[in-house]
Image (cartoon, coloured by chain):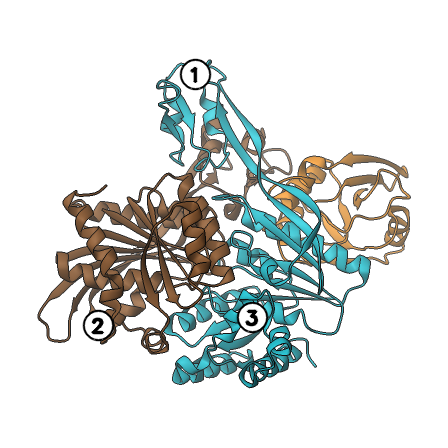
Amino acid sequence: MKIAIASGKGGTGKTTVATNLAYLLSMEYKEIVLVDLDVEEPNCHLFYFYWIQHKSGEHAHVLVPKINQSLCTSCGQCVQFCNYNALCIIGRAPEFSAMVFHELCHSCGGCTLICPNQAISEVKRPIGNIVSEDIVVADGAVVSAGAIKLFYGLLNVGEAKSPPLIALVKQHADQYNTRSLLEISDCPPGTSCAAMKSIENSDIVFLVTEPTAFGRNDLALAIDMVNCLSIPMKIIINKSDENDDLIEELAAQRGVEIIAKIPHDIEMSKIYSSGRILADNNTKMDSYLSPILSFIRKSERGDVR
Amino acid sequence: MKMAISAQGTELDSMIDPRFGRAKYFILFDLETNTHKSVENIQNLNATQGAGIQSASLIAKEEVEAVITGHCGPKAFVVLNKAKIKVFIKDGITVKEAISLFKKNKIVEIKEANVEGHW
Amino acid sequence: MKEIVVISGKGGTGKTSFTASLAMIGQEKIMVDADVDAADLHLVCSPEKKESFPFIGGKKATIDSDKCINCGQCQTACRFEAIAQGESTRGKFIINKVKCEGCGVCKLLCPHDAITTQDNQCGEWYISNTRFGTLVHAKLGIAQDNSGKLVSTIRTAAKKIAQEKNVDYIFIDGPPGIGCPVISSITGASSVVVVTEATLSGFHDFKRIVELTKYFKIQTSVCINKSDINDELSNDIEIYALKRNILVLGRIPYSKYFNQAQNHGLNIIEYAKQVNHPEVNQLAQRVRLMINKVIGN
């Protein structure tokens, strides 16, 4: 089962939920996969710092056109075709060939198809890194231990487009996860193409929100986003307090179940702030997350779909 | 020598359009014959991205040697530079006034983009 | 005229609350909400929409199923996995509008001219009146691309109004992250305020955003929010900032009153006036000092 943790608003607790769920589930299922898709600001790895056994990384690339100047006749068909204005021609061949602006390219490959002289080939352009970490977590008494395979992307600073890297990180996770291990994805905030790309192909989305005016507003947008892809979803209220009715009202209106509440607790914020897993630090995080855990158990057994 | 001026209208009395990539028009002026014509830039005005690049390529095809505009971003500058077109910066006056200042060498040429790129 | 952008890297650190407080300066200003896919600034400005404009960004393809002969060439060539056989079209190929990036490769390859591409309206933007002055804001459609273009559209509109009205300041509430809409929000701005929080994640993301503002050579200052959650980290953030010539505006302790102000549709300075509670007054005073630093008083 693929579980996506998402939210409209940033800072509601996606990473807290994802890292703690991963911790608890890895002990129960022995081995799980965690995918951090917030490639602009990935944070999951910070929480497993002490438990990392092995780490490896590789460059992530997208394909961009390269013009072979000796073949380019500056006919302009590629320029005409490109809907992203990533190519231009300023004069006649052989003095001038087409110019390429990589940062505008969407890697569609259209220019290579349309060039009548086979003057355009595709080359790799680095956009960031994909890191994978082998993590073995253990509870305090080392009664149980679990393995987490973590994948995350790190977008190069100054690089504008995150969706291609998100797609590549997902691809890596898919290639690894051939044994249908439980897979949890921590998604970027928002409701634009990056968030959408992240939740695609998930079996369930948990939307993490907080009982504030901003939390409610952005949750409404996030629900619309998940509906767009027709994926089942449930709501988790983080920093739950006396204002929960803000969220409960919206959830009822939209017919989305609130599966869990994590109370607001300054002590938990402090543990989180230093990059530690709450469920490993004498908090009640495991009991707050238990409705989610039992839902996952049931789904894994095939009781619900 | 021919030059291009980004303009808000089609006449010499039109004001300079401070934007280069998304200029409404370009006025092409021939310094030898003192004649001009205008080119509409509507396609680039509405482009999602890359307006500067395409505007630069549009005027490069007209074989001008200099351009006067208000702001020139990094990508447009790269194209203009490659096409060996010099970039001069002036804003807030009419095209006619700009040409006369240019003739007196009173407009500053820039050697790199004077604004950040839009995304 | 100065254009000041509030960003954070990590989400939920208090960008919008901080921007809303900036609105309290005495000088004329225009507010911009550049977090176009999860806009919240309007919730504490109660805007009255004066004008709205459609936002066209990119194209989307459509397949005419009467002309489609099911050859599948479009599906094979599409790099965005946006083409599949539809149930409703009895096996004829259809475009997934969410995944389509409007490149036009399918249209190029279709042997039967069954595919067309059209302009895609992917959002709306508005000019509104608020008690602080003009607010320029937007709504990006769900799952849409081109948020960067929408951000530059509203920034351009705000600048134009600022010039017409001879306004001193434009305050921009930026999006989280370091990608497209963030780059769009900060390029060419006068200065950037980073609101971070005293958490390991906040610090990690702060370092990435500082790299970004350095990359674009923009003057940067930092506000450390929820500082008392981890005083040690707050110190680390401050030292990190000072070493890099980043102006430290100060620290704000964690307080539930920020959320309460927000739930009342107010910024913290307004809320302090309303409730007149010592803790809120203190917070408001701290924030006031910071916004004065931001505008250089």
Display colour for chain C: cyan
Task: Kindly check if marks 1 and 3 are in contact, taking CB atoms under 8 A apart as contact.
Answer: no
Q: Are marks 2 and 1 on the same chain?
A: no
Q: Which mark is residue C261?
A: 3
Residue positioned 50% across, 59% down in the render: A158
Q: Secondary structure at mark 3?
A: helix
Badge 3 crowding class, 10 Å Cα cut-off, few under 14, some 14 to 19, many 20 or more, is many
What's the CA distance linking mark 1 and mark 3?
57 Å
Instruction: Please tell me which residue lies in front, B14 or A259.
Output: A259
What chain is tagged by disc 3?
Answer: C
What chain is tagged by disc 1?
Answer: C
What's the CA distance linking mark 2 and mark 3?
34 Å
Residue positioned 64% across, 47% down in the render: C125
Q: Nearer the viewer, mark 1 or mark 3?
A: 3
Display colour for chain B: orange
Whether A264 is drawn above or below A303: the answer is below
The three-letter amino acid code for the residue at tag 3 is: Ala
Residue identifier under label 1:
C68
Q: Which mark is residue C100?
A: none
- The x and y percentages for residue A84 are 55, 39
Instruction: Please tell me which residue lies in front, B26 or C61.
Output: C61
Q: Is residue C48 left or right of residue A42?
A: right
The quarter of the picture where residue C73 lies is top left
Q: Secondary structure at mark 1?
A: loop
Badge 1 crowding class, 10 Å Cα cut-off, few under 14, some 14 to 19, many 20 or more, is some
Display colour for chain A: brown
Q: Is residue A304 left or right of residue A242?
A: left
Q: Residue furthest left?
A: A143
Q: Earlier in the sequence, mark 1 or mark 3?
A: 1
Whether B95 is drawn above or below A36: the answer is above
Instruction: Please tell me which residue lies in front, A189 or C209.
Output: A189
